[in-house]
Image (tube, rainbow, N blue to C red):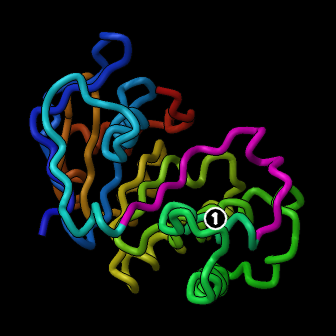
């Protein structure tokens, strides 16, 4: 079942075209990695799928169940966000804010669910700690737990391992893969790490000014564009488009 269908999508800012002719779908339980060089619209596409920006033209069709269940979003962190003065528990629970409506407090069920998410991500013992005191890997787990409180149907992740050391990076990718595998959560992830993308994902969308590839990961590895990027050493950088 398709949770998201994009038809002839074009993206840009202030009338400037960044990407066009985007035709792809995201199936329930999928793990889609969006890859490509900097400036080709990876983060812009993610924001369009979240409804944060409008496409220049084309159509994004979202499944009704997904609309009612919400989405979990882990954006790239800024230096200001890393210094946020709140406890781990407060930040994780804030994932429920949209579903709280006008209620001033979290329900007992929501508190229990937040605790369960912290246990699953191995941060329960950090719940009273200040977020600003944590390592980069711990902070990302906190934000991932927050995203899970917002939705257990689909996660949108923008460079979730950016800035982490190799050990924390490997752990983060393993945690995300486990959520997809064990809980059936759909994952849509922007990444500049091609090797991690092909290790964990089920489908790859490789962007240029126009889509260069969309299909199963095994097909991508065998494709010309896949072989080119997997053999290059130029895999660094972060997305700022």
Q: In this view of the protein, which residue sits in the foreground, 240 or 62?
A: 62
Quarter assignment of residue 107 = bottom right
Residue 96 in view in this figure: yes
Quarter of the view holding residue 87: bottom right
Judge from the rendering whether residue 177 lies leftward or rightward of residue 217; answer left or right.
right
Q: Is residue 122 left or right of residue 184?
A: right
Instruction: Tell me the SS state at disc 1.
Output: helix
As drawn, 20 above or below 83: above
Q: Range of the magenta residues? A: 70-88
Between 69 and 103, the residue placed more toward the observer is 103
Relative side of 132 to 23, left or right: right
- The residue wearing badge 1 is 94
Residue found at x 66% / y 60%: 140
Q: Residue at x 83, y 47 (%)?
A: 83
Residue 162 inside the magenta-drawn segment: no
- Quadrant where the image shows the N terminus: bottom left
Mark 1 crowd level (few <14, some 14–19, many ≥20, 10 Å Cα): some
> Percent from the top left, x then y, of residue 220?
22, 51
Residue that appears at 74% across and 68% down:
90
Q: Is 72 one of the magenta-colored residues?
A: yes
Asked whether the viewer can see residue 229, the reply is: no
Q: Position of residue 15 (x, y in %)?
A: 30, 10
Name the residue located 54 percent from the left edge and 74 percent from the top edge. 175
């Amino acid at each position: 079942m398709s949770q998201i269908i994009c038809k002839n999508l074009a993206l840009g800012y202030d009338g400037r075209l960044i990407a066009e002719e985007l035709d792809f779908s995201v199936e329930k339980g999928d793990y889609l990695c969006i890859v490509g060089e900097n400036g080709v619209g990876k983060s812009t596409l993610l924001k369009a799928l979240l409804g944060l920006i409008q496409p220049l033209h084309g159509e994004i069709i979202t499944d009704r169940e997904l609309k009612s269940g919400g989405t979990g979003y882990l954006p790239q962190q800024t230096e200001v966000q890393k210094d946020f003065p709140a406890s781990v528990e407060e930040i994780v629970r804030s994932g429920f804010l949209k579903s709280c409506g006008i209620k001033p407090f979290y329900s007992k069920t929501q508190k229990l669910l937040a605790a369960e998410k912290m246990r699953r991500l191995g941060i329960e013992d950090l719940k009273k700690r200040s977020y600003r005191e944590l390592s980069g890997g711990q902070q990302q787990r906190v934000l991932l737990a927050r995203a899970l409180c917002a939705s257990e149907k689909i996660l949108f992740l923008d460079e979730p391992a950016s800035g982490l050391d190799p050990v924390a990076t490997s752990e983060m990718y393993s945690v995300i893969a486990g959520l997809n595998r064990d809980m059936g959560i759909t994952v849509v992830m922007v990444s500049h790490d091609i090797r991690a993308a092909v290790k964990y994902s089920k489908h790859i969308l490789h962007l240029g000014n126009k889509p260069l590839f969309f299909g199963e990961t095994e097909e991508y590895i065998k494709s010309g564009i896949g072989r080119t990027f997997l053999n290059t050493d130029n895999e660094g950088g972060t997305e700022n488009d």
